[in-house]
């Protein structure tokens, strides 16, 4: 590895397989399947293929919230896609999401299966299908979608930018860590200012905007992302913390966090979910994941 302060890009970039860092083994400069593997299909119309990262958790929170409201049509099978083992490059998964990233949803309730990918698109799809958590019109709908799209555009700076260079890169580099720490603090300040006089992201109503923002920025202020709470002094963002705690107390949010989770404390893991009773019948035998995040 060269001294990064002296790096001059070559005329033509080439793929350096030895670049290192967590996830280097699954990164490639091309898309598409690396192997044949059909997706499993369970008994419910909704089939989710995911992992309990912040992007995955958005969707399982939504499904659990819909079920909590009594929408039995939101019953779902959640299959584990282990991204560090390359499950996202199986042919079946690539058919569900050509971008090879979790989460991906297949809806088998119609005459032909419908694929939905991108967590924001999945949240909107489910909100419209069940008529919940997305106001039908007016300012509240616009505000919900503005914050949903804000999250989709902003979180890559938090995850792919700050998280990557602070936690996953093969060595620490001051320039990108400074650049993305500044941006993440600015984003947290945007949220803190917005939430100063609001209960939820879109005002008085709990919406898919909350479900999208919470796993990332709620996780940040609760200190569960990248072990960076002290570095970023997240205690400053008191309104975000109040909102994050309030959402974290919701039983559906707590269930949603557990689905497709093969890491963390064993008591927080539910690798696959096929039935509401799976939350109660988990046994230590089924929980073979690592306790590492
Ligand atoms: N914009 C996408 C991002 C999804 C995403 O980045 N998923 C990550 C996990 S959080 C993933 O599957 N990574 C696997 C890979 O990059 O190969 C969404 O919100 O759905």
Image: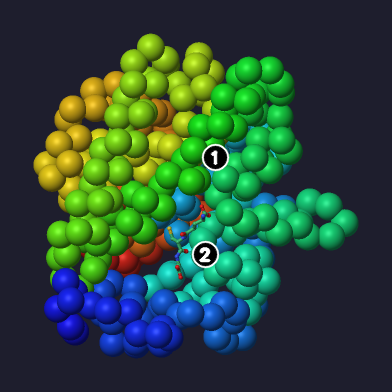
Q: Mark 2 CB in 8 Å range of ligand 1?
A: yes
Q: Is mark 1 within 8 Å of ligand 1?
A: no
Which residue lies most toward the right here? 111
Q: Quadrant of residue 229?
A: top left
**How far apart in space, not on screen, are marks 1 and 2 (Cα)?**
18 Å
Query: Is residue 173 toward the left or the right of residue 156 in the image?
Result: left
Count of numbered labels shown in the rendering: 2
Please name the residue that numbered disc 1 is placed on.
Answer: 149
Identify the residue at image location x=24%, y=23%: 238
Nearer to the camera, 1 or 140: 1
- Of the two numbered discs 1 and 2 on the same chain, state the one appearing first in sequence: 2
Q: Identify the residue under disc 2.
A: 101
Residue occupying image coordinates x 50% and y 45%: 152
- Tell me the SS state at disc 2: loop
Does residue 33 appear in the picture of this structure? yes
Above or below — where is 236 with respect to 175? above
Q: Is residue 216 above or below residue 44?
A: above
């Amino acid at each position: 590895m060269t001294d990064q302060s002296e790096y001059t890009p070559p005329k033509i970039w080439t793929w350096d397989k030895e670049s290192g860092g967590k996830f280097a083994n699954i990164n490639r400069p091309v898309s598409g399947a690396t192997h044949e593997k059909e997706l499993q299909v369970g008994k419910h119309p909704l089939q989710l293929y995911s992992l309990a990262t912040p992007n995955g958790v958005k969707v399982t929170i939504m499904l659990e919230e819909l079920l909590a409201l009594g929408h039995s049509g939101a019953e779902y099978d959640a299959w584990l896609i282990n991204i560090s083992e390359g499950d996202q490059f199986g042919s079946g998964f690539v058919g569900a999401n050509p971008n090879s990233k979790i989460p991906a949803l297949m809806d088998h309730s119609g005459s032909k299966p419908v694929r939905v990918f991108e967590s924001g698109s999945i949240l909107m799809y489910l909100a419209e299908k069940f008529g919940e958590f997305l106001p039908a019109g007016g300012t509240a709908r616009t505000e919900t979608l503005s914050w949903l799209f804000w999250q989709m555009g902003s979180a890559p700076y938090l995850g792919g930018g700050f998280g990557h260079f602070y936690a996953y890169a093969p060595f620490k580099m001051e320039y990108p860590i400074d650049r993305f720490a500044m941006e993440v603090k600015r984003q947290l300040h945007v949220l803190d200012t917005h939430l100063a006089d609001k209960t939820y992201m879109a005002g008085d109503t709990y919406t898919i905007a909350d479900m999208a923002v919470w796993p990332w920025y709620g996780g940040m202020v609760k200190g569960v992302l990248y072990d960076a709470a002290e570095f970023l002094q997240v205690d400053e963002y008191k309104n975000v913390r109040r909102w994050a705690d309030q959402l974290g107390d919701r039983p559906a949010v707590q269930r949603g966090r557990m689905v497709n989770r093969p890491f963390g404390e064993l008591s927080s893991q539910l690798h696959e979910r096929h039935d509401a009773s799976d939350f109660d019948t988990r046994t230590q035998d089924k929980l073979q994941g690592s306790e590492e995040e």
